[in-house]
């Protein structure tokens, strides 16, 4: 009643306008000015578009597998935003502590955030207990941290490769809290191509040099076939003494060298 008496607001006219001019988006009307559209109340995710083909899953290639002295980790170095290559030489492996390395796939910001938080929590765990958590314990901590973000627009897949009191171990943690452990794990859009190379050449208890060449070859072939992988090949080794990094190699030059070596082997067999 107060609005009707002071402002001259007509309830019946307002109801007729709302029924005739219904809009799903909230809007503001002002006489003499165009309609101003406001963003919807519910923010939609670009990763869950209802129309069109789904976006490629995690445009990268990371892998990790066990060998006789520890864990072999390899990644590519291409960072992309949609169809645009943002950086050809990014680092996709983060050192959590001296015996634990995290190879990441997904949104760079999300992966860096969770990597830093996990490194902090591991350090706090060490200060409280006098020793670092196991690889599976760190994976459980990361899974617990990711669980509250379930259903949100978070894109992060982390492979934890490390050495603890029980020996070498590999754990995979997804952004919805999923946590698995395996002897061979590859993540990213290039993982199917990497798995094809690993399945052909992987043997339990491999020597270090053989494992290094297998990891390099898997990432190289994945980067050659996958449009979202490329740049350089980074190889890391997690041993009882700690994490070591191998020299990076250009993926294009490495592929040419591998093709030349295969030709020489075929000619030698003849």
Image: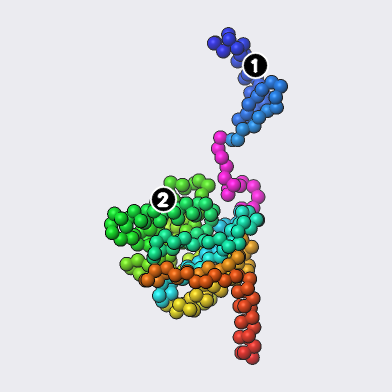
Q: Nearer the viewer, residue 59 or 102?
A: 102
Q: Is residue 7 magenta?
A: no
Q: Residue furthest bottom?
A: 270
Quick one: label 1, few (<14), some, or many (20+) residues within 10 Å? few
Mark 2 lies on residue: 145
Mark 1 lies on residue: 13
* Residue under the point 60% across and 35% down: 39
Q: Read off the magenta span.
A: 41-54
Q: Quadrant of residue 270?
A: bottom right
Q: Quadrant of residue 131?
A: bottom left
Mark closest to the chain's N terminus, 2 or 1: 1
* Residue under the point 49% across and 54% down: 112
Left or right of 18? Residue 210 is left
Left or right of 142? Residue 214 is right
Q: Position of residue 61 (x, y in %)?
A: 55, 64
Q: Main secondary structure of the magenta part?
A: loop
In the image, is residue 22 above or below residue 268?
Answer: above
Q: Residue furthest left?
A: 129
* Residue under the point 39% across and 51% down: 144
């Amino acid at each position: 009643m107060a609005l009707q008496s002071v402002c001259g607001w007509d309830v019946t006219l307002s109801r007729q306008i709302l029924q005739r001019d219904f809009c799903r988006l909230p809007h503001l009307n002002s006489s003499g000015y165009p309609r101003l559209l406001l963003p919807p109340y519910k923010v939609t995710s670009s990763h869950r578009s209802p129309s069109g083909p789904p976006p490629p899953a995690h445009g990268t290639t990371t892998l990790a597998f066990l060998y006789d002295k520890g864990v072999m980790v390899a990644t590519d170095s291409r960072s992309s935003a949609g169809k645009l290559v943002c950086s050809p030489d990014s680092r996709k492996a983060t050192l959590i502590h001296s015996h634990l390395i995290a190879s990441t796939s997904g949104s760079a910001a999300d992966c860096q955030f969770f990597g830093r938080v996990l490194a902090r929590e591991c350090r706090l765990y060490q200060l409280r207990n006098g020793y670092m958590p196991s690889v599976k314990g760190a994976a459980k901590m990361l899974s617990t941290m990711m669980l509250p973000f379930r259903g949100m627009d978070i894109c992060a897949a982390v492979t934890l490769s490390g050495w603890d009191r029980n020996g070498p171990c590999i754990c995979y943690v997804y952004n919805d809290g999923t946590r698995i452990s395996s002897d061979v794990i590859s993540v990213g859009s290039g993982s199917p191509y990497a798995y094809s190379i690993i399945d052909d050449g992987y043997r339990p208890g491999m020597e270090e040099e053989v494992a290094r060449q297998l990891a390099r070859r898997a990432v190289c072939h994945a980067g050659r076939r996958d449009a979202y992988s490329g740049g350089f090949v980074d190889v890391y080794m997690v041993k009882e003494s700690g994490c070591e990094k191998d020299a990076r190699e250009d993926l294009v030059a490495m592929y040419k060298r591998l093709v030349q070596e295969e030709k020489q082997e075929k000619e030698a067999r003849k």
